[in-house]
Image (tube, grey):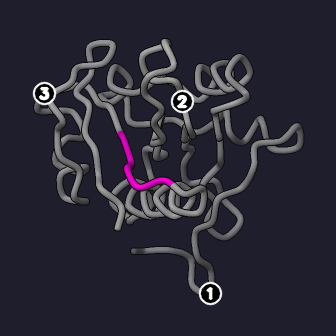
């Protein structure tokens, strides 16, 4: 991972003091149709505070991305299945390819384990411009489901 010398990436809670920084995180223009903007994530976190976990990804003194995880979410809305995973991942356009996405996935995996989870779910838009290869490279595998038009993949946590 390429980072600032002497620093390492970390997750930071989104607060009133840094919300402007969070809102400024933008993916590449060719990726905007694949991932919702940070503003949408924060609105979803506001209406789902019981499961949403929005965080800035910071390295040194700069925000390099944003993620929103979900924990113990009622997947089908009927109480039968509860899941945890990555709801949204936005790596800033000029920070991509430096390992921040992998850092974010590992950090969410650690949080899921800390909370007693054994499976890590992601969803993504299918197609050549999507993040399928990124997630597959980290060990995620499709489980055969489509959720709101997106491919569902799972990583078993050991």
User: Foreground: 95 or 75?
Assistant: 75
Closer to the eye: label 3 or 2: 2
1 or 3: tag closer to the N-terminus? 1
Q: Distance of mark 2 from mark 1, alpha carbons?
A: 37 Å
Q: Give the magenta range.
A: 117-121
Question: In this image, 17 relative to 114: left or right?
Answer: right
Label 1 neighbour load within 10 Å: few <14, some 14-19, many 20+: few
Closer to the eye: label 1 or 3: 3
Say which quadrant the C terminus sits in: bottom left
Residue 129 location in percent, x, y?
18, 32
The residue furthest right is: 17
Relative to 59, is 132 above or below?
A: above
Count of numbered badges drawn on the protein: 3
Res 155 label: none
2 or 1: tag closer to the N-terminus? 1
Relative to 140, is 86 above or below?
A: above
Residue at the spot of label 2: 73
Q: Pointer 3 and pointer 2: residues touching (CB < 8 Å)?
A: no
Residue at image position (48%, 41%) is: 84
User: Is disc 3 placed on a helix, strand or loop?
Assistant: loop
Residue at image position (38%, 65%) is: 99
Residue at the spot of label 1: 6
Res 127 label: 3
Q: Main secondary structure of the magenta part?
A: strand
User: Foreground: 60 or 82?
Assistant: 82
């Amino acid at each position: 991972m390429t980072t600032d010398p002497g620093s390492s990436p970390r997750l930071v809670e989104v607060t009133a003091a840094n919300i402007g920084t969070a809102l400024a995180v933008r993916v590449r223009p060719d990726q905007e149709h694949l991932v919702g903007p940070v503003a949408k994530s924060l609105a979803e976190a506001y209406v789902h505070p019981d499961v949403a976990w929005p965080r800035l990804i910071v390295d040194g003194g700069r925000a390099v991305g944003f993620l929103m995880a979900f924990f113990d979410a009622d997947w089908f809305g009927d109480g039968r299945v509860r899941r945890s995973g990555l709801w949204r991942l936005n790596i800033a356009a000029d920070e991509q390819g430096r390992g921040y996405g992998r850092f974010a996935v590992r950090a969410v995996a650690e949080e899921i384990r800390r909370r007693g989870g054994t499976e890590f779910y992601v969803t993504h838009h299918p197609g050549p411009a999507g993040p399928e290869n990124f997630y597959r490279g980290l060990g995620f595998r499709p489980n055969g489901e489509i959720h709101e038009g997106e491919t569902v993949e799972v990583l078993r946590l050991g």
